[in-house]
Image (cartoon, grey):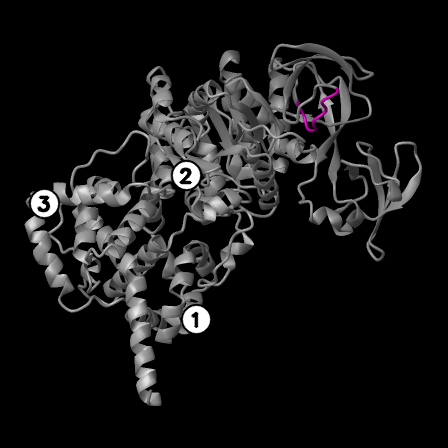
Amino acid sequence: RIAPTPHINPVLADIPLTQEQRQAIRLTCTTPDRFIAWQGSAGSGKTYALNGLKQIAQAQDFRIKGFAPSAEAAHGLGQALGIETETVAALLASQAQAQRELKQLWIIDEAGLLSMKDAHALLSRATAQQARVVLVGDTKQLSAVEAGNPFKSLQAGGIVTAHLDETLRQQTRKLKTVVQLIAQGKTVQGIDVLDDAGCLQKIENADLRREQLAQDYLKLPPENRAKTLLLAGTNQERLALTQTLRAALQAEGSLEQDSFTVLGLRQKNITQTQARYVTVYQPGDVLVPTQDYTKQGLFKGQQYTVVSVDRENQRLLVETPSGQVMGVDPGRCDRKSVYTVQEVAIAPGDQLRWTKNDRTAKKRNGQRFTVEHIQSDGTARIIDGEGQTRQLNFSGKQYVDYAWVSTTYSSQGKTAERVLALMDSTTTNRESFYVTVSRAKHHLTLYTADKAELMQQAQTSRAKENTSDYIPLFKVVINHAQTPQTHSRYPIAIGRAIGRGVREHLREMFTASEGGNQNPETACTSNVINDGDFEPARIPATADEPIGASIRRYDNGFTSLAAELEQHLEPLSEAARNYHDQQAILECAGDLANAVGSINFGLEQLECAAENRTRLAATIDRLDQTIERQVEPGQSEALAEATDADETGATHPAYAELWQRYSQGLTARNSVQLDDLVGRRALEDGQSRKVVALMLAAASPVVQDIYQRQGKAKARMYVNQTVRAICAPRQSQQLSKLKTQENRLELGD
């Protein structure tokens, strides 16, 4: 652990933090897990809260390092926290330290932009170096260009997660409301609020939309322009808006006339895998290796211009910096960047940015600067965002581009007083729309062709998925980015509890669709504690343990289960039919418990199918009848009688004392696992199901947390499920013994 509670509280008392921020810091400092995720909505104060974590960790002699997918994000993290930072790519390309540091804390900002490959390598590197890792990001925002969405999968797989949902960035009531609505998936209502507030400019013609945005920008005084973020969906739209804006600025006189044209290199929008094939190349593209490939005559950092493409032989004919021409196989040089060449006309007053890191020249990818003066031969004087002035020459091919307008993707992580954004039909989706509207603090204007079309596009998700999302539902799989600590967070009790929760949601859905009146909370016939018999003791949560975090994660994950499953039934139906035999179900009880992670992944897998609703309902009923463990005759009545006496609370102290006795010496990863271990120990010691249930009701922190947050019914359901899960192995053994005896009788033993 990073720090004990007595060392945490004094630091938190001196910093103005929200309750969510305090809980995130406390959870990070006290969890025994090596990896933890901070799932924070846009503008929820994640970076500010990290300052508090840094203070506590440094006081415990931890060395803190920051990493991010992009150089600009890494630089921003370093500036905000005052720590050493670099890109994730630089970390993975570096040699591992020969001597391990026992106290390392790695903060990974914008973790949602990590690809599956990089995330796997990063977590493996952290494990080898015994570093603790805090992954900070938001699954509702944009994901990596490369394959995979590991930040989302890690949370679905059970990584310890702190949630920061309170919006702090927006300073006006309407903007705050809009961002909250969109974060909750209520996109239509959010757009209606924007329209009512006059934040939507509906102009059908694309050229007129760009001109209107430029005119609105010109109306701002210079000091407000500097605090304004201009956004476009694609690079093509960004460049078109830039040209419109520059022409307007030159007509106004705030931007001088063009003095020099530089050949700018803009990175091509292709993945590393696509760059292996000649079909994505065009004559004039520039290939830049990031390591030496001597067999092909390619050297790190050199620019090789594509002269022609030989698709038949899968070869590129390239021109070297010395003017020679040679053939290259792009499939044999994986580590490379590919650029297109564009003419960038430069005038004094232009805002530009670097498009490639160059540590020697102190250039950072995404770093903005302003041209103060430029001569006809390309010699220029520039000033960067930190106020540093330098002289350089723009002749030749340069890693430079305009910075007047940003793409939505590159704006993730930025904040501005005012945002003016062009909404296009190509890139607008749920994730990009959320990023766009959540950048502004005070003012937001969206320029769109049609409000109805914008609503439709902004509700469509294009979040990246993982191959593991399509693994069959009941196949037990450990995701390659999961660590042993992550996977072990699925005890059998949790698996069975969630499995029953799935069935109850499904039964509720089909009952409602058929006009039935079945109450899902009374669907289980073997409840351990009945309604009205349950009154948990009010045990205060301890300061160093976040009560109910796991349960809230599971509960939140299944609130919209019915709506998702309604269209995607066939895979579950097929999987259920494969488990028709009762003995097979009993034998696979452990597998089913460990398949909780696969259930999470399977929920998205079900988005691929849309038929056979009736057959699934019948299958679920059969599955429910097969899996459901029957309570021994008379047990439910006995428990009801016992809990009647407990309703007054008179017997709580006795059962609370039992809980304390059976919990002594136990080590658990979370409060849910502790319930399971305590119950099993009590059962093995000869205690009855009734006593185990009353112990949970009297002293379980999880029960108390659920009771306070979600009410008696949910807490009672948790107790029922937990006790049944604890007793299930014994019942399975009894069934096996009975079947063995029957077989012996049949054989004449």
Q: Amino acid at mark 1?
A: Glu
Question: Viewer-proximal residue, 691 or 442?
Answer: 691
Instruction: Indicate the quadrant where residue 106 lies.
Output: top right
Q: Residue at x 42, y 62 (%)?
A: 591
Drawn side of residue 447 relative to residue 580, left or right: right
State the mark number for residue 651: 3
Q: Residues within 10 Å of mark 1 (few under 14, many from 20)?
A: some
Q: Residue at x 38, y 39 (%)?
A: 182
**Comparing labels 2 and 1, the label whose residue is closer to the camera:** 2
State the mark number for residue 161: 2
Q: Residues within 10 Å of mark 3 (few under 14, many from 20)?
A: some
Q: Assign the C terminus to one quadrant of the image.
A: bottom left
Drawn side of residue 350 relative to residue 21, left or right: right
The span shown in magenta is 353-360
Q: Amino acid at mark 2?
A: Thr
Question: Viewer-proximal residue, 239 or 111?
Answer: 111
State the mark number for residue 636: none
**N-term mark: 2 or 3:** 2
The residue wearing badge 1 is 574
Q: Assign the N terminus to one quadrant of the image.
A: top left
**N-term mark: 3 or 1:** 1
The image shows residue 598 at horizontal and vertical percentages of: 45, 57
| CA distance separating discs 2 and 1 | 33 Å
Q: Residues within 10 Å of mark 2 (few under 14, many from 20)?
A: many
